[in-house]
Image (cartoon, rainbow, N blue to C red):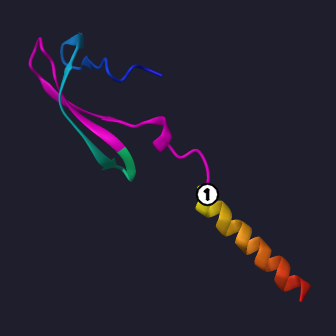
């Protein structure tokens, strides 16, 4: 995984940029950090959105699993009557 603190300038190349603003946002329905950056060499400004690995959904949530288990239990109970 790349080091997100060492972003390079997309305009002038491999120059480390400075963060001038950072705030949490909802980005495409996912919690992220929006960082406004400026290049110290060419002074261009640009925005990056950084997602933590914890916000990436890799499977069903606990609520979905509990809902499925509840439905299975109700089906079992209904079939035994």
Across the whole image, how many numbered discs are drawn on residues?
1
Question: Residue 52 location in percent, x, y?
Answer: 43, 36
Side (left or right) of 28 relative to 23:
right
Query: In percent of the image, x 46 and y 43: which residue is there?
Result: 55
Side (left or right) of 58 relative to 26:
right
- SS at mark 1? helix
Question: Residue 58 location in percent, x, y?
Answer: 58, 44
Dot 1 crowding, Cα within 10 Å, few <14, some 14–19, many 20+: few
Extreme left residue here?
43
**1 up-or-down from 71: above or below:** above
Query: In percent of the image, x 37 and y 47: which residue is there?
Result: 31
Please identify the quarter of the rendering in which residue 46 is found: top left
Question: Residue 34 location in percent, x, y?
Answer: 26, 38
Query: In percent of the image, x 21 and y 18: which residue is there?
Result: 17
**33 up-or-down from 15: above or below:** below
Which quarter of the image is occupied by the C terminus?
bottom right
Side (left or right) of 66 relative to 25:
right
**8 up-or-down from 55: above or below:** above
On whether residue 59 falls in the magenta region, the answer is yes
Extreme right residue here?
80
Side (left or right) of 42 relative to 75:
left
Query: In percent of the image, x 49 and y 40: which residue is there?
Result: 54
On whether residue 69 falls in the magenta region, the answer is no
Please identify the quarter of the rendering in which residue 70 is found: bottom right
- Decide which of 77, 39 is in the foreground and name it: 77
Q: Which residue is mark 1?
A: 62
- Image: magenta residue range: 32-60
Extreme bottom residue here?
81
**59 up-or-down from 5: above or below:** below
């Amino acid at each position: 995984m790349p080091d997100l603190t060492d972003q390079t300038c997309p305009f002038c190349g491999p120059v480390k940029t400075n963060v001038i603003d950072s705030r949490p946002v909802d980005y495409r329905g996912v919690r992220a950090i929006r960082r406004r950056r400026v290049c110290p060499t060419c002074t261009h400004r640009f925005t990056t959105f950084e997602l933590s690995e914890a916000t990436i959904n890799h499977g069903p949530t606990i609520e979905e699993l509990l809902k499925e288990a509840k439905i299975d239990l109700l089906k079992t109970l209904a079939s035994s009557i």
